[in-house]
Image: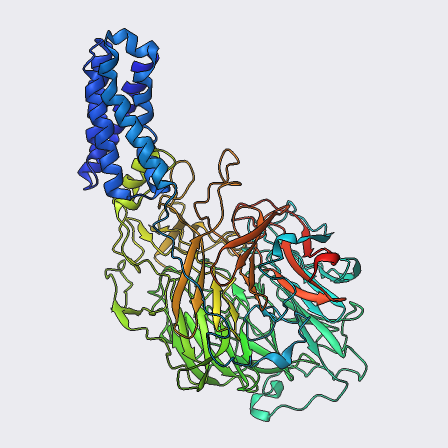
Amino acid sequence: MILTILLFALTGLFLTAGGAYLAVLGGSAFYLFSGVILLVSTVMLFRRKSAVLWLYAALVFATLGWAVNEAGFDFWTLAPRLDIIPPLGLLLLLPFVSRKLTVSKVALLPLALSILCTLGVAGYAITQDPQDIAGSLPSVAQQGEPVTPGDTAEAAAGDWPAYGRTQFGDRFSPLTQITPANVKNLKVAWTFRTHDLKTANDPGEITDEVTPIKIRDTLYLCTPHQILFALDPATGKQKWKFDPKIKYNPSFQHMTCRGVSYAETPAVAPVAAEADNTAAATDAPAAPAAPADDCTARIFLPTNDGRLIALNADTGELCHGFANNGALDLSDGMPMKRDGFYEPTSPPVVTKKAVIISGAVTDNYSTHEPSGVTRAFDVRTGKLLWAFDAGNPDPNELPSATHQYVANSPNSWITASYDAGLNQIYIPTGVATPDIWGGNRTPQQEKYASGILALDADTGKQVWFYQTVHHDLWDMDIPSQPSLVDIRQKDGTVIPALYAPAKTGNIFVLDRRNGNLIVPAPETPVPQGAAPGDHVTPTQPYSQLTFRPKERLKDSDMWGGTMFDQMVCRIMFKRLRYDGPFTPPSLQGSLIFPGNLGMFEWGGLAVDPVRQVAFANPIAIPFVSTLIPRGPGNPAHPDPKAGPSGSESGVQPQYGTPYGVDLHAFLSPLGIPCKQPGWGYVAGIDLKTNKIIWMHRNGTTYDSSPLPLPFKVGIPSLGGPLITAGGVAFLTSTADYYIRAYDVTTGKQLWQDRLPAGGQSTPMTYETNGRQFVVSADGGHGSFGTRLGDYITAYALPEKTQH
């Protein structure tokens, strides 16, 4: 009895104190009300008053009504509202308490009834999912005359020769051996260990995000330290490896390699570029032409220390005719040449003439960092052909003895897309760093930030540009490779479209010939009131194809593992500035939702261009952005010898601006998201109507809760999907360690298998010796918190059940 009284007293005190503070902030008064009732109940228990049973029954009924009113019949949003007060009621029904209250069994009935009603509501709610959208994507036949993909010439059906399989970035395979009917029979065919693991010299952001490529009889992949392996695709046995021996330290913001690129360079003399677009305009000597027999097939490997390396695809030896004995120094022409500030992490685009590369620039460090320039180099010799420097009024100006690229020009850190028919490259651009303060930016730095830039692949001249976020103060760039797909209209005409998923949750759909919107994205008023010295634009484009939240968050949308931390999350929410999407960063602290991680990240969409459908995996995690004025411990200028910040979250210095910034996910004291689940989904989109047809929570708490319980709340993912003509999609990137297969038509999960480490990558598929394989890189993700490893896992149907 004493322990029960003590438990009631402590619970009542906590809810009363916290509830009073929340009520003062304008939040729900129910926590205060329930805390007071608990304290009254404590006194009654101490005095052995049997009326406490009636009072507490009333509190349980009130709690149930409040919970359903706020959360509806969504079990996971009901749970933290019902996991304290009703269980305490059970204590009162136990004999060691009820006997000391000297009551008849009849007096226990109201409280027992309230507990039974609570259990009944919870039992019903667990069968419901108000967030679920059920539907069926149309089949090829239902979509009418099929469209022949515009990129089919780029890849043999059984190959995966580029990061997105083709440079259309659709992540679609025409293979059909694996189907919804037989996918349950998939087994591990082989496993390869790279032995490339985290070292003491690595940053926290070490990640295995690679999507391998497969050309004919070889599979190519790179590791977090950019070690390149060539494997036999049938057995996983190593053919050769190349170690670039990169220079790195813990201050690097990234340590990752998302992939490599392949080029066939027939043994002919390089074609001289036109005079106004070549490196002859620079003082740099031209690289020597490659010998006729030197690397007629080559792999391009980007490295985090700012190099682009060309290797013989057959032997792994350096292509000595490319740049400086096979290695191109990407720091040439840069205004800042220090290790770790310019990091190419994604594979370049390859055309018949050029290899075209951009790179990541350290986020939020200072106003003097490397340029985000995009450059094209001769695919054989490494000679500079053209540049597009978004921070320069003449973006095509090449470096010389008197000119360097512009510091802090907007960068592009993910792979671009390429349409060989139009000869256009489509570059997803980021914001000019520092990301969270715009008061220092020039008009030119703003001009090409956070959008899609189309360039002529031969000259680097602008074809068009569409901006998805104006004066970006939230790091809401285009984070993934745009997907190119030709869409047949009702009148039979075909429009060459571009789908660009954004961190904001918007998917911008553009005519890739001219950048005109296909799906409307009207300019919509957004919250105003930036910090002194900065400004916010009056409007932002809101695409009508979107996963953006339909309503603003409310304090009732806050969550927790218990009623206690849910109340704390509601207090935290009320203390922050939040006016909806695009709330400006502030000294008070602003809630940013969608958060800086974005609703879409680098994985992008998977598109079936024949069926005209897409598979997506959006996420929903709010962040907090708090500006920090300069003062002790927050200097305006860096130590000249200091390295980059080594992280994209936490306190970021933003040297050269009036403020540093603290960026972090909006989490409860227990380290779980303060926003109620779901936090991750899979979704199907009909590209002919541009409507979301189905959407389901995806992933479980198995690897993120104190106990390994597979509650399907819908958890975040970091990586992309794969879609096949067989009607199956694959995803490995959730924070639990599973590869999953889905029916593309309905989104139903068909199969899953346990991974040895985090699968924060995009899987790929290929065929060899008549057998279809699905391959994933399972090496984990440092800042995402998943288990690190060094595994490449290949799945296939048992040979006797392939058909």
Left/right placement of residue 140 relative to residue 551 reads right
Left/right placement of residue 608 relative to residue 635 reads right
Work out which quarter of the rendered image holds the C terminus and state it: bottom right
Q: Position of residue 417 (x, y in %)?
A: 54, 75
Q: Where is residue 610 in the image (x, y as percent from the top left)?
A: 53, 75
- Residue at (32, 33) in percent of width and height: 120
Left/right placement of residue 710 relative to residue 316 reads left
Give whichever of 432, 116 is nearer the camera: 116
Quarter of the rendering containing residue 469? bottom left
Q: Is residue 487 above or below residue 803?
A: below
Task: Looking at this view, name the residue that lies furthest to the bottom.
Answer: 275
Figure label count: 0
- Residue at (35, 62) in percent of width and height: 473
Work out which quarter of the rendered image holds the N terminus and state it: top left
Q: Where is residue 692 in the image (x, y as percent from the top left)?
A: 39, 64
Residue 193 visible within the image? no
Residue 137 visible within the image? yes
Give whichever of 201, 111 is nearer the camera: 111
Quarter of the rendering containing residue 244? bottom right
- Residue at (68, 90) in percent of width and height: 271
Left/right placement of residue 385 relative to residue 680 reads right
Instruction: Name the image colouring.
Output: rainbow
- Residue at (49, 71) in percent of width and height: 482
Q: Position of residue 635 (x, y in %)?
A: 40, 51
